[in-house]
Image (tube, rainbow, N blue to C red):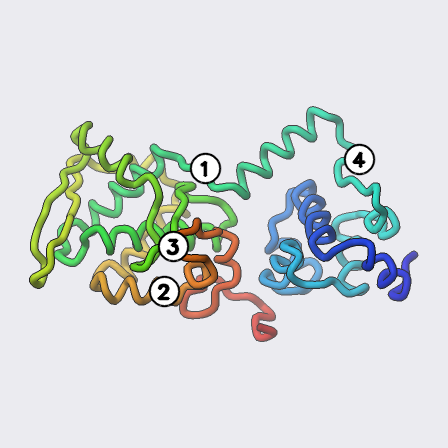
Amino acid sequence: MLNSETLIDMNVKLSQKQIGQRITELRKMKGLSQEDLAKSVKISRPSLAQIELGNRSVDILELQKLSLVLEFSLDDFMSKDFSANQDVDVKEEKRAKKEEERISVPTLQVNKFKNVLLYILERCAGKPNVGETVLYKLLYFSDFNYYELYEEHLTGAKYRKLPYGPVPQKLDTIIGQMIDKGQLQRVKTDYHGYPQTRYLPLEKADLTELRASEKEVIDRVIEQMSDWSAAMLSNYSHGDKPWKASKEGEEINYELAFYRRPPYSIRVYEDDEQY
């Protein structure tokens, strides 16, 4: 059994990042979400997210609670030769790694993205304010709100930080394909004296491609933001933690959604008052 003094000595050899990586591996092997594990050890989801990212240290009491829930030996956990997959054969290990990559790394699901785009346009294309700028933000908040809520990617689209807010990558290519196939029409208009690019849906979204939970998140975003002007929505997106914490021109990390605060966060964390 490790006491706090022994743990401190061993922590000198293991970095916070290494500890966080080991906890992440063990949690995923158990099939637990961050929310599940955080509740079990009575810490907030943001706290656990910071631990797993290596941005926060773990005290002896927290590590003991984690060891009980994740069923690992403290001595083994702190050793240099520790492996979360010690009792798993090679085939199982490969499957686990593939599953981990699927969850943590956004991979664009083109067909899903097209149907989300069509669904948003079905509901919003008739609104005079919904040009490219507003559309980009509706897509962004749909994707990041869903990830914050369910720890899964909605469309898997990657977004880049640009001066007017987050912009989905490869959107021009996808829209070009949809125009060629007769799914969308691009229209140039004038809105309050400014040129505006709008998109009109020429076919309905295939709602069988969207789960009820996905459609619900998109509907909430549409209800909240689709009547906002482009300037108002751009300014609002600049206050969102994922955009603020990213560097100009770089890809926005979905994990940053777990550090949101009201009014951006769509989750309520039990001990959020710590932050």
Mark earlier in primary sequence (3, 4): 4
**Mark nearer the viewer, 1 or 2:** 2
Q: Quadrant of residue 8?
A: bottom right
Q: Which residue is mark 1?
A: 107
Mark earlier in primary sequence (1, 2): 1
Cα distance, mark 1 to mark 2?
24 Å
Q: Position of residue 227 (x, y in %)?
A: 21, 62
**Mark nearer the viewer, 3 or 4:** 3
Cα distance, mark 1 to mark 4?
29 Å
Residue found 62% across the figure and 60% down from its top = 50
Q: Is disc 2 surrounded by few (<14), some (14 to 19) or many (20+) residues within 10 Å?
A: some
Cα distance, mark 3 to mark 2?
10 Å
Whether tag 1 and tag 3 are in contact, CB under 8 A, the answer is: no
Q: Which residue is mark 2?
A: 238
Cα distance, mark 3 to mark 4?
40 Å
Q: Is disc 1 surrounded by few (<14), some (14 to 19) or many (20+) residues within 10 Å?
A: some
What amino acid type is highlighted by mark number 2?
Answer: His
What amino acid type is highlighted by mark number 1?
Answer: Thr
Mark earlier in primary sequence (3, 2): 3
What amino acid type is highlighted by mark number 4?
Answer: Gln
Q: Which residue is mark 4?
A: 86
- Please, which residue is most extreme toward the bottom here? 273
**Mark nearer the viewer, 4 or 2:** 2
What amino acid type is highlighted by mark number 3?
Answer: Lys
The answer to whether residue 266 is left or right of residue 196 is right
Mark earlier in primary sequence (1, 3): 1
**Mark nearer the viewer, 3 or 2:** 3
Residue found 15% across the figure and 43% down from its top = 200
Mark earlier in primary sequence (1, 4): 4
The mark found on residue 161 in the picture is 3
Q: Is disc 4 surrounded by few (<14), some (14 to 19) or many (20+) residues within 10 Å?
A: few
